[in-house]
Image (tube, grey):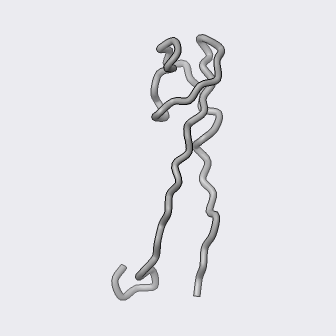
Amino acid sequence: MQGGLAEGAVLDIIELPIDAWCMQCAKTTVVKERFDACPDCGSYQVQITGGDELRVKEMEVD
């Protein structure tokens, strides 16, 4: 926002791998997108177990 409080602000997003549990083949795996199929068996019965967190690591305000 030019001329505003956020001028010069930087947003760094670090993407983590999406860990998932496949209910069909009972394996822990990594998927590329939230609604992808299990790469091992092709089932869409996949529960996300990690990688969808959001954490603000640092914020400076003047």
Residue 27 shown left or right of residue 18 in the figure: right
Residue at x-position 46% and y-position 76%? 9
Please determine whether, in this image, residue 5 is positioned above or below residue 15: below
Please determine whether, in this image, residue 3 is positioned above or below residue 37: below
Give how far across and how far down residue 61 sits, in percent.
Answer: 59, 82
Please state, as top left, top right, bottom left or bottom right, where the N terminus lies in the image: bottom left
Residue at x-position 48% and y-position 66%? 11
Give how far across and how far down residue 30 sits, in percent.
Answer: 56, 29
- Image quadrant in which you'd find residue 29: top right
> How many discs mark residues in the rendered view?
0
Give how far across and how far down residue 26 sits, in percent.
Answer: 65, 14
Residue at x-position 64% and y-position 18%? 27
Residue lying farthest left? 2
Give how far across and how far down residue 60 sits, in percent.
Answer: 60, 79
Residue at x-position 46% and y-position 30%? 35
Nearer to us in this view, 10 or 46: 10
Please state, as top left, top right, bottom left or bottom right, where the C terminus lies in the image: bottom right
